[in-house]
Image (spheres, rainbow, N blue to C red):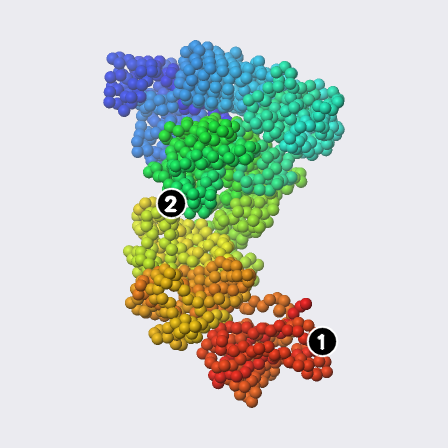
Amino acid sequence: MSTPFKRTLSFIMVFCIVIATILPSISKANGEDLEIQASDLTGHWAESVMNKWIDQGLLNGYEAGRYKPDRAVTRAEFAVLINRIFEFVERKELPFTDVQSSTWYAEPLAKVYAAGAIEGDGKGLFQPEAYITREDAAVIVARAFRIEASDHERRGSFFKDANLLSAYAVEAVNALQARGYVQGKGNQLFSPKRNMTRAEIVQLVDNVMGTVIHEEGSFSQDVEGNLVVNSDKVTLKGLTISGDLYITPGVGEGNVTLDEVVVKGRIYVLGGGTNSIIVRNSNITGTLIVDKWNGQVRIVASGTTHFPVIRLLSGAILEEENRVQGSSSFSKVFIHIPEDDEFRNVSLRGLFQEVRNISNGVHLDLDSNAVVLTLIVDAPLNVKGAGIIKLAKLNVSGSTFDKRPGEVQFSKGVTATFGIESKSVTSGAASGSTPGPTTPSVPSPATTLPIVENGQASASIWVHVDADEQTKEAAEKLAEYVEKSTGVQLPIHTDDPATVNPHPVADQAQIYVGVEGLPNINGQANLLDGMDGDGFVIHQTGSRITIAGPTSWGTEFGVDEFLERYVGVRWLAPGEDWEDVPQRTNLTILKNDEVRQEPAFFSREFDTHTSNTPERAKWTRNNRMHGRVEFKHNLFSLFPPSRYKASNPEFYPEGVNTDSHGGWQPCFTAEGIVEEAIANINAYFDANPEATSYSLGVNDGMANGSGYCEHSGQVNSIGYDNMSNIYYDWVNKVSMGVFAEHPDKYLGLLAYSEVYDPPTNGIKLDPRVIVYITDDRLSWGDPDLRSVGQDITEGWLEAADGVAFYEYLWGTPYMVPRTYFDLMEQNYRYAKDAGVTVQYAEMVPNFGEGPKPWLSTKLQWDPDQDADVLLQEWYVRAVGADAAADLAAYYEIWRQFWEEEMFATDWFADWVASEPRMNYFNFLDDAYLDAVTPAQIAQSRALLESTVSKAVTAKQQKRAQDLLRSFEYYEASALSHSLEKAIPQPTNETEALALLNSVLTKMRLAEKRRELIVAFKDDSFLQQAFSPYIVDEKTLGGYTRVWSGMTKHEMDALVAWLEQEAPAGPVHSQLEGLAANDPLPSIRTHAYILLRSSDPSSRTLLNANPSFEDAGATTAQADAWNLWLYDGTEMSRTDNVKKSGDYSIKARGVRFGGVIQTVQVQSGVHELSIGYYSPAGSDGKGTIRLQLDFWDAMNNHLGSVKPYLETKRASDTAGEWATLYWAGEFPEGIVKVEAYALVEGFGEDQEIYIDDFYLNRLSPDPYADNSKTPLNLNTSFEIAGSTPQTSSSWNTWVYQDNGTLQRTGDETGQTADYSMKAEGIGLIGGIYQSVKVDPGVHGMSVAYYSPAGSSGIGSIRLQLEQYDVQNNHLGNLTTTGKLLSNTAGNWTTLKWIGEFPAGVDHVNINVLLEGMGVTQAVYMDDVRFYRLSPPSIPAEIQAATVNLNPSFEIEGDTAVGSASWTSWVYQNNGTLQRTGDDWRFVGDHSMKASGIEIAGGVYQSVPVEAGEYGMRVSYYSPISSSGNGTLRLQFDQYDANNVHLGNLTPAGMPIGATAGSLATLEWNGEFAEGTSYVNVNVIFEGFGANQEVYIDYAHFFRVEP
């Protein structure tokens, strides 16, 4: 970011200078010895450090060798010390009445005062003779060295006695502590009022000391850390400085030379003169900061020296000398001279890529050989001299130029004065173009190469005949964007050496795309030697401009640079609307302009969501993102279990599920596994020679030790098993074998989870192994985490030369813009300076974050760029100069939130304290939204609306509207989100209605979130790839950060009100209206939930054993429950603590586990609640939450409900029972749910108890009144099979004959006389029957009885095997098993309900018995399988039905008659009548026939034509009904004259054969020509006196030909 006013030295420099120049030389003050005496060091806490200084000659003793370590220092002495450090020159008259000009310290105090380091006590006094306190010393140091506290540091303090700090000292002390300069007195006490001792000064200096040169000479020894040069006539030769270089005022006006020096940090020039600082053939990677007090210092870059960034905080002379051809010594120069600095002259000599001025009144002198490619003017300046400015971008008025730049771009309304014209020029004055970047004048032909002149092409594009497709496409891109800018299409020619005169005329520029265009004379063919493959040059030879890189990627990126640098193109975000292409009439480039660039990081890559549309992919590529190393989770692919599990089981850990790609790792120490890995990877490279890398990345999913074969017995820095030594030893061995055959390849991997830390066993990985360190470096805004993260990085840099940063820049999962621009800049710059060579980021973009993705691309290419400059450019280019400030202010709100306010939230603290701690913030925890204020949201909307109103062009307006539209999702999320907290119970109707309406407002906003995601799905800018919702497979979903807008506390308050309000009350009335008529389904559902929840009778319990009262196979288990312990100590049933009943579930030390039950359900509204209790005093970090997984009949997963807002930290309610709750709607097609209470992250001894787990249905049962007529036969086993011990229609089986299963009538039956008895079925056995079904909802039940005293752990369950018409198995539906012994002595019913989808033709209905004891017995009876939903009659039958009233719903002349039907009974021997009180198949009525001994029936006359017809009749005879009666169809045919043509009489069916079950009578046949109508008959015959049958759904239909 832009450097604050006069920010200069770090504290390291301060005290290095103290050491070198002050402590040895101060001898007396006011007649008293200032030196400390030596003999008093023995046993002193500072003995070691002070003896070290004595040995190094940094501390001299006086008078008997004593050092006086505990002597206090006066304020005057301390100020003199500061002046000796800096050797300040400027002085000001002192305002202090207690400092006399004659005192020994008056002169140095005047200089320290002028420097702003001292201010006095506010009463006109300095109190020079008083001892300096620790807090005052901190303040003076911080002022002297401009050490400023960040906003985060201003908020709180490390020290427990911070309340004792004076207000003026808080920021200084916090800043010094955050940087490690002060540590306090122990127990985190600073003791601010305590006097500062000499020993403390020495210790403080020692903490930060680097190497000091304070005498002239030549030095060549490498420096680890910082180097301070405090003397002139110093030459540094051939050395490497790993830290920063400080050239201090102690150099005076002298000189310092750097010759072949590598400086990995920054260079601070604070001293030197006009002939002073020579930097020759040196490698400078950091920023050069110039801050000379009088602005008189000359810095010369000679030979190959290149300064990437220079910041001028004072005047200076910058000069090139003996520059290597084709290069530039100065990339970016920022001029930021303080307003009160009278020395404001800057002189430039040489080639400068970019100069930016942000200081008023600067005098910029351009020597005649100075060339500035781009000058950006953000503050008025005066430009003198004959040098050349190729392009000037003027953002403010008031600048003057002796010489007009080659090209000028004005912001709207900006004016400037050019001496050559002697007049002021305003934006658009020459061209008349619209506001924005314009070209007021035509550059001088003598200094420029024209590309487009006056709307005509003055150049052509050339590509070699053998160029690859990528190079050709780059040339086409160049032509495309030049045409977009100028309207002129540059011709593209093919350079074919075989063609005569291939080149254009000599006076026309030629833009050659590709390496073939580079000159091949005078040694210049080596321009690309040693350059990274993504690097490039833009090189001129005469009228030819060559854009070329070592690879096609480099050439393409060179074209991108050409378009950005010369045409002014910016790809701000994906999509045509977000391309910013200045409109030009003329396009020129400066002659002899040379560009050479390489990326700071050789591989730069975002996740696939950033390129998941063509527009996004194009944007990513145009901004030079190019991933070159494979590194992601991949060991499941290297060792696929399908290939190795059988032949090499030793490659895999025992007892883990290797079917998934995560949660397990191969056995790294298994015999042969190294050799197998080498062979597989070499085979891959052999088969894919174009591949440049292969991934050794560990499998995803935290294995937590259970997924590894090996165990280290150690915990790493983030709390996981430390597997680094084992894993990286394997990596090292594999890499040696791979690189032996493929030395030009890379191997990538992830430092993640268990292998996050660097190895500690001395392993040094090959440089071609690229280690991606995973971290959410937003966390580095916390000084402690930054220190830890950088320590990890530096540890990795010792273990591997190939280090990459894997960053979590995530946008979409977050609900407000996660824009931490300052930290991004710092982190990218640190990475480059530290030696990181690769960058990868999970961007998961929300482009509503504005410049964030674009800024990331720019800083990944060159992290030394100023992020403030880049951001300002993005804002102006996106929405125009007038609107830019509002847009910047909008994003500043959220930068402050994430970089400052977020670090004070519980959300952050919880993540930091989690054990183990993931490498990224918990984006599934939305608690950070609790820190978002309505004021921030309102201010954000106001700023964006203002941005929209101020945007000028159509594109600017569209972009502003896109940003506002994207903000609506943030707004809806923040305003609809609420954390659970107690609310007052309404005491009257007004309060209750106000609460309801507040909830409704939030619920509508919550629904708006979903609507926006749907609306965004096809928009490359707005689309959210990690949205909380699944939309046409456009989003990942799964991360269900979805909420209703109503909290449980709000719901409870409303339900409590409803329970005491009359049904006609206003809240009831409003909710009933909403439930019936609101256009939003979510509002209708939740209104319904509130109404049903206030009526206790509406709840239907669905799950079994909710309070765990019934034991499972052991007393520690619970019947019907899976007590799942993936990783932890204990999960068991207990009677120690309970909420209700006698039992609960105890979980102890559970890192991941829970209680689970599978429950058969239907679609509709449901609720889930559990009680939980954590013992008083529990302070662990463990959490508990709910989860529901939805499944259909084919076992397809329909989705999950993971109400993360209901994730609770158990310790928050320690000592009291608390409740988790969810209510919502199950989707159509659902047949079962898996209901969970999940326990996560508990410490070893942390406990939680779970009780009262209720899954209730709130919706009425839609099938409660439907007939449950069995579809299966012989439901009560009354009909024997081939033997008396078997049962007709039923198959029995016992695995390995381990037990018995037979029909019995001698002992127990629930109904009638028989049942099935099972005894001693040790493994598994059961009964089953095949039943034909149609799609729809069905049910099944079985009554069972285990005799009292029958012991064992046997269980019973239902299973339905589904088959299609070809008898292909489509899957099983299975209920949770029930322990027989829990209900011994009582008849119990086990039920199932579910839905069969289309395609299921028949099912095998099973009753299964398992695990019974040898003498354990059970009886089964009344096995019923029935249809619940209306019959599934094919649509073609319904459409072709020709008879009337097929279901007898319409009453006839009497209540017992049926319209359109005639009923008859021969000799009235029996009854036949319409009924609505008994069985029916569909609707409310059927026809009942009883005791028809001879014959009877119903008929209807139906017109027909010749052709094929069919008929179906459903019928049911009760199981208790006995007799030999039959049921048949008959069709009496007649012609048009009523002449009887004969009958069609299909065979009848004995109704007793299907007694107790639903059956169907069907017929298909053909009527001949001449048939005009038929009497359709259903005929009953030969009934017993008590025999009955019901008929329904009698359809007579035409079969289409």
Which residue is at the front of the view, 524 or 933?
524
In the image, residue 652 sits, relative to residue 1109, either above or below, namely above
Q: Name the residue that disc number 1 marks.
A: 1569
Report crowding for label 2: few under 14, some 14 to 19, many 20 or more residues within 10 A (C-alpha): some
Tag 2: amino acid: Glu
What residue occupies the far front of the structure in this picture? 1282
Please identify, in this view, whether the residue under mark 2 or under mark 1 is nearer the observer: 1
Numbered disc 1: secondary structure: loop
Q: Pick whichever, 1562 or 1301, lies toward us.
A: 1301
Residue type marked 1: Glu
Q: How many marks?
A: 2
Q: CA distance from mark 2 to mark 1?
A: 76 Å
Disc 2 target residue: 654
In the visual, does 1087 lie left or right of 1569? left
Position of residue 865 in the picture relative to residue 368 (left or right): left
Residue at 37% x, 18% y is: 19
> In the displayed structure, does residue 563 sit left or right of residue 720?
right
Dividing the picture into quadrants, the one containing residue 362 is top right
Label ID, residue 627: none
x and y percent of residue 829 in the render?
Answer: 49, 29
1452 to 959, vertically: above or below: below
**Percent position of residue 521, x then y:** 64, 16
